[in-house]
Image (spheres, helix red, strand yellow):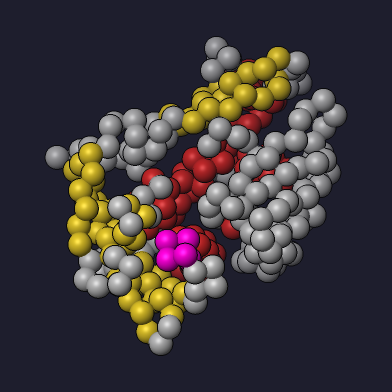
Amino acid sequence: MTAAPWWAGLSPAQATIDCGGQRHRLRWEAGELRALDHDDPTAERTLAAIGGEPYACIDLLAAWTRHAADLRVLVLASRGPADLLSTPSDPPGRPARPAPLRRGRPVTAGSVGSVRIRAVQFSSGPGHIAAAFPPDDPDAQLIELLGLGGGLSHRLAATVAAEWAQRCERLDVEVSRARPQLQAALYGRVAAGLRTWLGQPTLQVELTMIEPDANPALRERDGVVCADLPFRWLAEVWARHVATVAGRFSIAATSSGNRWTLLTVGPDLSEPQPVVMELPPDG
């Protein structure tokens, strides 16, 4: 049987936004974002480009496409439920959209590869982030995408993770340049997952981002949990919310049709054991 597509196991996600004074639906399903209340988004995008009336839905579809391989999404997007974002500077009449965002140190220009995010403040614990951008700043739409509710921000992060996992598999020339960002994105989510799983918020974690054909592993050394994982762990495990299953930590996932085999490790960090799951086609 053929391997499942990258989006298999991810359920549909939907958010409602203000578009031209009406409430419209954006829905992600089977790897694609659609504007359900627009009959011909392509034509409307063309009209807007030549001076027609702009639509928020169409603008966000275009922004999604532009950022579908943008590693800044993984820098800023949530590592888990404890990461929160609020955007108090939202336009009048539009409610603030609480959504997940990564916790950590403040990001400044040049601090993480080519990241260029301004006026964003990260909390060191559960809390909020203020985001303020000029209306024409392209980063404003990135923050708006990450502020979409209904699980859409996670689907965008999964999209970016899957794209870069594929690039790693085919040895894309850009992978070497992007390696620090890839490793940072992987480390943040692996560390957060391990600390939650073991109930140790200050657990020391050491990550080695291994090549796609190397064997993943999880072990303890001098009080430090050491993880050897490929970048595709983000797309195959983290994105599908199966980092922990039945009290065990997943270090790899393979599929055949709707059957998924997770390679898992117990809290004693002993030899990995497989756990088999059946997922419906739409997750």
Answer whether residue 65 is visible to the viewer in this image: no
Q: Residue at x 46, y 46 (%)?
A: 158
Residue depicted at x 23% and y 39%: 278
Quadrant where the image shows the N terminus = top left
Main secondary structure type of the part rendered in magenta: helix
Q: Residue furthest bottom?
A: 222
Q: Is residue 35 left or right of residue 218?
A: right
Where in the figure is residue 221, as x and y percent of width and height? 37, 84
Q: Is residue 204 left or right of residue 135?
A: left
Q: Which quadrant does the C terminus fall into?
A: top left
Q: Is residue 126 left or right of residue 8?
A: right
Which residue lies at the image location 68% right of the left edge and 64% below the top edge? 124
Q: How many badges with numbers are in the image?
A: 0
Residue 198 in magenta stretch: yes
Is 179 above or below relative to 170?
Answer: below
Q: Which residues are magenta?
A: 195-199
Residue 258 or residue 115, whichever sits in front: 258
| Residue 23 coordinates in the image, percent (x, y) | 67, 17
Q: Is residue 65 magenta?
A: no
